[in-house]
Amino acid sequence: MKKTAGNAPKRRGQFASICYRFSRNRMAMLGLAVFLAVVFFAAAAPMFADYEADAVKQNVYAKFFSPGQEGHILGTDMYGRDLFARIIFGARLSLLISLSTVGASLVLGCLIGSLCAYYGGWLDTVTMRIVDIFLALPMTLMAVTVVAALGTSTTNLIISLTISMVPPFVRIVRSAVLQVKGSDYIEAAVAYGSKDMRIILTHVLPNAIGPIIVQATLNLASVLLSVAALGFIGLGVPSPQPEWGTMLAESKAQMRYYPWQVIIPGAAIAVTVLSINLIGDGLRDALDPKLKNG
């Protein structure tokens, strides 16, 4: 008990140090501010617009309104739907799919990767060869194949992206666990008689969490781009649900005469992905300052 109580202040001190280093990174803080703004508008979307009336329902008398025209902040699309409403409700859907995908793949990746690294042997060899096969395939191509087989829906999109995202997590978790597997505190826990699963959950993974968090953050940006790419080619969220990639696909034919139809959803994708990447870079430097200094 004394050992556990003594480790608590140390862990709190490490967390405070990480937060301080992250807060000193101006670009990371800028990325965090932008991402929190996106999350706020996504979460509070019903406060700013009505989903059915503004984002989904068509109005042939309000087609192609310019930004600011007749109370439409960002204008309207080819079906007379408010672009601002579709952007913020599209942010909600895109973030929901991306966070669900990264969360599910993170859990599966941590489980498989930690077991492979901890036990090794044939389990590690066979699993990593399977992972190598999946990693040889582009993530978007794999997702396209799964969606084409299962059909287009939000659930199938999450399943397809999760399948394609698990292998990178397995590899990064396995590498992180191997670095701490031979540490003295792990050997002490084994000698003390702790069960393998308890050692993995309470000693191995918490001390290997740094690179896993960074990988999860960067993968969130990749998944967001994949969601938009699948929507653009018609394999994403089915219409008329607002999704940024689908909005790009619907407006590409009007790009010459109504450029804001493409610029607005494209900017939403670019700004959100950039903010997530800035957060990921900041977390990488904060969790391992040697990378930045060395």
Image (tube, rainbow, N blue to C red):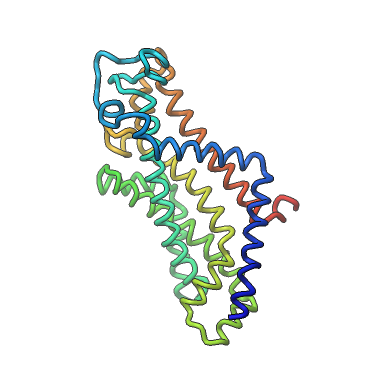
Give the image location of residue 158, x and y in percent: 34, 49
Q: At 27% from the left edge and 42% from the top edge, which residue is drawn?
A: 152
- Image point 47% across, 64% down: which residue? 110
Q: Looking at the image, is 139 positioned above or below residue 49?
A: below
- Extreme-right residue of the structure: 294
Residue 153 percent coordinates (x, y)? 27, 43
Above or below 60: residue 285:
below
User: Quick one: 65 or 292, which is closer to the camera?
Assistant: 65
Residue 206 drawn at (x, y percent): 55, 67
Q: Position of residue 248 (x, y in %)?
A: 38, 28
158 lies above or below 113: above
* Left or right side of 114 for 178: right
Question: Which one is nearer the viewer's eye here, 181 or 85?
Answer: 85
Instruction: State the count of labels.
Output: 0
Examine the rendering and report whether any part of residue 151 can be seen: yes
Q: Residue at x 42, y 28 (%)?
A: 265
Asked which quadrant contains residue 1, the reply is bottom right
Q: On the rendered structure, is 90 left or right of 27?
A: left
Residue 232 appearing in the image: no
